[in-house]
Amino acid sequence: MSTTTKQISLPVTVPIGGIGHTGQLRQFYGLFAREMIKTFRNPWVIAMTLIQPFMWLAFFGGMMSQLPTAQLDQFLLRAPAGTSYLSFLLPGVLATGMMSIGMFGSMSTIQDKRFGFMKRILITPTSKATVYLSKALGSAMRGLVQIPVMLVAALAFGVHLQGDPLTWAAWILGLVFLGIGFSAFFLAITSSSTDWQTRGSLRTSSRCR
Amino acid sequence: MIGNGLAISAHGLTKNYGKLTAVDHVDMSVPRGSVFGLLGPNGAGKTTIIKVLTGLSPITDGTASVAGYDVVRDPMEVKQRVGWVAAEVILDDDLSGWENLWLQAQLQRLGDWKGRAEQLLQYFELTDRKKDKVGTYSTGMRKKMEIALALLHQPEVIFMDEPTIGLDPNVRRMLWGLITGVNKEFGVTVFLTSHYIEEADALCDHVAIMDLGKFVATGTPSELKNRVKEDFIEFETSESMTAEKLQAVPGVSSVRSQGNTWIVRVSSAEEVLPNLLRALKTEGIHRINVEKPSLESVFIDITGKRIEQAGSEVQDYRKFYMSVRRARQ
C-alpha cells in the first residue's frame, strides 16, 4: 500500500499537441514506428528477411533452371549474351515476395485484434483509416527491405543488371506499389476478422467483438 | 457539450448483438469525481456497457454521454477524455514501458507529455524498469503500467474492466489502494466493473447491480445493504424437500429453490439454523452457507442466485483464457 501514501505533485497539464491532419500524422507515425520497432528489433525477423531471397534464388532458382521451356528459350534468345536463367526469374521472385509479405503483414493486425491491442488503439481518438494506413505501409515496408537484398543476391549469383537507371527506378517504384497494394489488399480482407487463416481463405464473415 | 455535472449519464441504453440483448434499457448517472461500481456475474453485460460508453461499439438504442460529450455524436471528444484499463492486461510486450507510454502519447496527440509520464512512472514505482520490455514485468507491474497509460492524457473518466480478475490477494489489495489513489489524487471519475462483492463494497461510492443486461438495483453500498435486513441460509440437500416444509420452520420468512439448492430467508441465521437443521435430515446435506446482509445477499434477494454461481460457466472460460495468456508471456 506504499503507493497510496506517496505524495507527488500531480497533475501536470498535458496539452494536445496536434489537431486535424497534424494530429493524424502523429498517430500514424506512432503506429507505423511501432510496426517497424516490433519487426526490426527481433534479430530472427531481420535474419529471415535477409536470408529468404538468397534461399529462394539458390533452391528454387537452381531447380527451375534445369527445366527446358520454350518461353525461357525465347527470353534467352532475345536477351543479350550472358543473360542467365536467374535474370528471368528475378522479377517474378520479387513480385511473389511482395505478395507473401502482404499476406504475412496482415497477421500483425489479426494478432492485435486477438490480444486486444486493437481495442487499446481504437479507444484513443485515432481513426480507423489511420490505423489501416499505418498497418498497410508498415507491412509494405517490411517487404521493401527485401528489394536491395534480392538485387545483391542476384548479383552474387552472377546476374548482370542492364538497362538505364530510369528503367531501374521505374521497376523499383513498381515493386513499391506492388508491396503497398498487396499489403492493403490482404489487410482489407482481414480487417473484419480475427481468424489467422482468413488471408488465405478470404472469409470475412467472422466478427471482431 | 452537455454540462450536467455528470461524468457519465445514460438513458434507455441498449446494445444488441444479433438477437442477443447484452444491455437492456439501462439508465444511469455517475457524478464527477466518484467511484462507480458495476457489480454482476460474468456475462451480465458489464464489459459491453464499457464498450458502448467508450465508443468501441455502436449503441443500438438510447443515449449516453461521457465527460459531457454524446457518445454517438462526438465519439472522438469522448475518447480524448477517457482512459481504459482492460480485464486482461493489454500492453505491447515487445516495447519497453517508456515506448508504450510514447505510443499512447502519439495516439492521444499529447504535447509535452514526458514530464507527466515520468511522474506517473514515479507514482507507480516503475521508473527503474521503464527501459525494459513490458513482457518482462510482473503481473502487478503490468497492471500498474496499464493504469499509468490510462492516466497519461489526463482523462476525466477512467474505465476499469474487472481490474483485479485473476490476481492474487496481495496484488489485488495493492490495486485497491491504487484505484482509491487514482480517484482522490488525480481527481478522476472511476467506473469499474467487478464480480467481487468485497471489491465493490470497499471501493465504490455508488454501485449498480447488473444481471442479464439490466440494472436490478442501484445505490450506495450501505443503501443497498439496508434493503436486505434479513439473513439467507443456502443449502444443498439430496433429501426430497418441499417449500411448505421449510416455511413451517419458525423464523423462516421465504423460500426459493433451484434444483437441490434451497435458499431460505430468515430473521436471524443464528436463531433459525438449529431449527432448520432439526427439520432436515443432516446426512442428506451436502453444503450449507449463511449469508449476512451484504451486496451478495442483495443479489440473492433480487435474482435468487449467487453472483459467482450466475456467471460460473463464463468465468471458467475466462480463467482458461487468462491462463493461456499468462503461459504465452
Image (spheres, coloured by chain):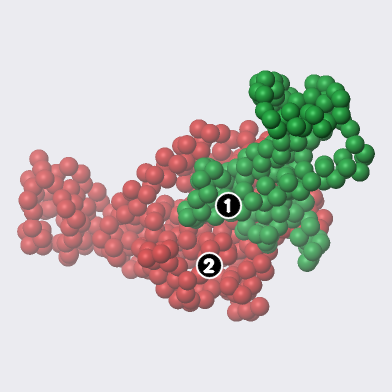
Residue B58's tag is 2
Which x, y percent locates residue A39?
Answer: 71, 37
Q: Which chain is red?
A: B
Identify which residue, A93 or B265, lies in the foreground: A93
| B250 left or right, relative to A5 | left
B7 over A34 or under it: above or below: below
A111 over A118 or under it: above or below: above
Q: Are marks 2 and 1 on the same chain?
A: no
Report which quarter residue B293 is drawn in: bottom left
Q: Secondary structure at mark 1?
A: helix
Identify which residue, A19 or A168, lies in the foreground: A168
Amino acid type shown at disc 2: Pro
Chain letter for mark 2, please: B
Residue A189's tag is 1
| A51 left or right, relative to B194 | right
Which x, y percent locates residue A44?
Answer: 68, 27
Amino acid type shown at disc 1: Ile
Q: Colour of chain A?
A: green
Question: What residue is rendered at 17% in x and 57% in y?
Answer: B257
B115 over B70 or under it: above or below: above
Q: Secondary structure at mark 2?
A: loop
Mark 2 surroundings: few (<14), some (14-19) or many (≥20) residues within 10 A: some
Report which quarter residue B292 is drawn in: bottom left
Whether residue A7 appears in this view of the structure is no
